[in-house]
Image (cartoon, grey):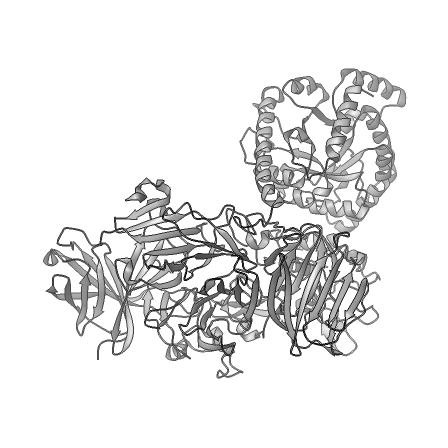
Amino acid sequence: MKFFFLPLILTGFIKGHLLIEDITLPPKTPPEIGALCFDELGQLYVATRRNDIFVTTPTKAPDNFKWKLFASGFHNACGIYSPKPGQLLVSQMAELTEVIDSDSDGVADTYNNLSNQIGLSGNYHETNALCPDGKGGFFIAAGTASHNGPTFWNTNQPYSATGRRGRNFSSVQWRGWVMHYNPTTQDLTPFAKGFRMHNGIFLDSKKRLWCGDNQGDFRATSPLYLVKKDHFYGHPSSLVWDPKFPKDQDPLNLPQDKLDQMRTPATVLIPHKAMNRSCADVTEIPKNFGIYPGQLLVADNNGHRITRIMLDEVNGELQGACTHFINQPKEKGGLRSGNNRFTWSPDGKQLYIGQTVRGWGKLAEGLQRISFAGKIPFDVETLKLTKTGFHLRTTLPIKNLSQATITATSFEYRDSHKYGGKRLNTKKLKVSEITQIDPHSFTIAIDPLDPQKVYSITLKNLNSSDNIPLFNRTFYYTANQLIK
Amino acid sequence: MNPTINRLLAILTVTLSISSATHTSIDDFQFGICGKPEIYPTIKASGFHYVEASTKLLTKPNLNDQAFASHLKSHLKKQYQIPVTNSFISIPLVGPKKDHSSGLKYATTVFERAKKLGVKKIVFGSQGSRTPPDHYDLQTARREFVTFLKLIVPEAQKRGLVICLEPLTKDNLMPTLASAAAMCEEINAPQTLGITADFWHMMNNNDEADNIRKFAKHIKHIHLAEQKGRTPPGINNQDLSAYWDALVASGYKGLISIEASWRSPISIKTHHARSLQVMKKDLQKAIQKSKSQTGSKITPHPEGRISSVTYNNNPLGTPQKPLILRTYLPDPGLDQQVLANHHHAGPSPKYSPAVGRDVPGTYFPINGIPAAIAVNHGKGFSYAWDTTECRLLYTWSDGFLDMHPYWGTSDQGNRTGFGYLPSLTGTMTYMAKGNHPLTLNSQPIKSPKFLGYSITNNQPTFRWKSQDTTIHTTITPSPKQNGKFTITHHTENSTVFGHANLPHTTINHPLPNHLSITISPNPNLKNQIKSTTSDSESISIKTGEKLFLKYSCQMCHTIDGGKSHGPTLQKLHGKKRKFSDTTITADETYLRESLTHPNAKIVPGYQPNYMPKFPLQESEITSLVLYLKSL
């Protein structure tokens, strides 16, 4: 392969499965990547934290992109989308901005404020992510503020003293919400609430809307949410902006069991540290990539990892499992930490991942590109609940199921006002009836099998028929419900 | 006078006056060692330029004129280069034992003799003479010291000497460059009074290296040593690059003295050459670094290729291609009418996520503008246009923004503290006041809506809407006068503009729907942007006191119950305050409000709108409140 001729530092491999390349950014540019997108012409736009949006047409060589400054004047743009070449939608701190290159000279000249209805208090944490709704409009994830920073005396949009309380707070309107922008009516309307820091929002090929969130207050661990209209996702501060929420109530005073009743649970709970420390962007693997088509990936903004999601439909509702897609540091050919935004090359074969660490943790920023290197990993491809346990399907035929050691535990997470939460009620489970269904799949029975638990399943000594050891050993299944 | 000294001084004078716009080179610096004059031949052999000797020992003020004449003669014969001296004075200058008349007499003799000896600069550390006794009121001591400086500065000036105030370790009168700079500002004799920046004392006092750059205009002399053991450079190989970088960035050129402890096994004789080598190498490195950075400064925002901003935390545009930077901006003290369309935050109880309820303490908002656009036309002109108010908020010259508090350093990238606002650099030239100055068909501007902006010939034109009329607004600096600018509004329909009559403005109204207003710099705003102390300065009564002095609060408020322009601050905390309509207790909230919104409540008998809003950072407000509570 021609990549072997590139300097070693620019490329790495994940056991021959994935090729990871380091993209050289424009000179003198602080490589703090806030957002990424491709346009129809295959041009890649990269928004940086400090002010700029660059454009390039990617080349095979990762160190030879010709960059051009497309637009500047953006305060921490964390969402970007190109409806058509020469036009960008950008969510920056103070507004949702439409950027147009009206004379087609390759440089933007018109900046339109589509909406500044999402308030800005002056807190550094109030970033906004965006994704298209598939019908010409957009969803915007409006992050909350952090108690590690102040508000200003003068805010943009209404301020709530009640919303100001708490660790991550919603002192100005629509913080902690997913909003919808309708280009026809030019209206910004509330869509869903109860988020803490949904740093990334994504509409999948089945028009399902996804957000991750970050472990913290009211988040025992980082969750992945299927976002539905008018649903509440458990972080109370945003409720101060809900017209239906009683004006005289402080949502922080709601008892936790009340919040638990009100909220829609996470589709998948992603165990903290074991899997992911701070969920950032979500994406779906295209058919063309080579492995795991249609599965979701979640970036870890605080680790050299990407989490792979295996969805399962139970009683008509989605829940599912997670494991690592990549868990390998750059020094060993893997990823930087600070994984923030995903975008796919138009052919669906390359996943670009923009990295930034925003004032916490070690500096880890830049742009990398992931492609399938040709060798299919031996891994669990799907993990589904059965009436008595789980059904596992692997990517390659299994050689030695009878020699495998399979163990399982269950545990729970309980959200609270406190920051993060431990695994609770961890139980060792009995694994039995290990039954091979076909060369690729087998079932196990688990006892006891209860709802509202996270199941950790560990497989040891399992090889493929051509003797490849299993890529991941541990898989976490979130069972909101059991099969009725 | 010794001809060699004369020549050296001529070189120094020339190099010092070269503008910092040219690149610094290693030849712009002269290196010396603090020590006895006799070391000169030894260190000269390795490339040092001079010795910094003791003022007292060199000028011998106690000798009678005749004895001094013979000392002078024998000294000049030796041809030692001693352009600067330290250890100035030991007569008490502050406190109950102060003796200004002896001090002045002594200083005058010293200056006269120093001049004859070819000395050009006198370092004023002399901690003993300016340390007040315990429990002595520091502000009084400071006032006494300033009084003494005012006495001696004219004497030094007459003789062409420069006095270099030196902040020292455990210095309670002048612990930082900022505090020394405040004195220089107060006395305002830029040719005669400056500062010695001593890296060693700065490290001991946590005075940030970058302050050398911040207070560059006052820095007249440099001392250095490594922190541990005060060893000369190169002995413990301490990384002093932050100091060298700041020094080069400050544009300083001239003398650099090692003031170190040459204790066995280190000695001047055995180690001076290594120290010089290390200093030169470090300085060369800093110069290289600065060249690569200023390279991007000189050509900001070129077509294509590189970013509009880099790791340089002082980004700049050019008049041809202004830099449009969207970021949080400081509120330099705008009145509430200017920010009429903003919403108002307030103090919030501290909430503990650990215990899940409020705990004692309060979070206070800070003074910032959330959604403005900063535009820089190069060093000559910058402005802040606000998308919430749809109006120009302020303009300033000779700088732009220091983004360091918000962007952090290139190797860390984190905000520097709770109050992370970028700071304004330069001189304020215009600040909006009162209601929106425009009217549309005689109606005031109501709920303006920001539509966006368009770039034509690299210049932005803002589009906004009020009363269903779209207004196009462009701000253009005068090419001739720094700080002067024209703001043009036009609409495409037949709306008739009106504009409030404001000072420093000329209104040109060629068509009903076209208005251009030319505004000249307002000289009263000269001191609006004060270099604020670093946010990393600890929050303490002491810091509060320093700020109190820095902003000259004592000009209007006594702390001893005496009368002045404003009410006394003595025992204010907890006191009942009577206002025309209400009585309140002067609690912490009131003290803070008085700092952040000084005209919210006016004590009867005092002038409203007298006290300005100072550009204080959150941590500074906290320190000031602590200090006020201690009075």
Q: Quadrant of the C terminus of chain A?
A: bottom left
Instruction: Say how many tags the image has.
Output: 0
**Quarter of the image holding residue B360?**
bottom right
Residue placed at 59% from the left, 53% from the top?
B405
**Quarter of the image holding residue B344?**
bottom right
**Residue B621 located left or right of residue A443:** right
* Of the pair B66 and A277, the residue shown nearer to us: A277
* Of the pair B306 and B609, the residue shown nearer to us: B306
Picture coordinates of residue B199, whole percent (x, y):
63, 37
* Of the pair A234 and A127, the residue shown nearer to us: A127
In the rendered image, the vertical position of residue A295 relative to residue A327, given as above or below: below
Picture coordinates of residue B121, whole percent (x, y):
77, 32
Picture coordinates of residue B528, whole percent (x, y):
74, 57
Residue placed at 42% from the left, 79% from the top?
A230
Q: Quadrant of the N terminus of chain A?
A: top left
Picture coordinates of residue B99, whole percent (x, y):
85, 40
Residue B349 appears anywhere in the view = yes
* Of the pair A338 and B256, the residue shown nearer to us: A338
Residue B95 appears anywhere in the view = no
Residue placed at 51% from the left, 74% from the top?
A174
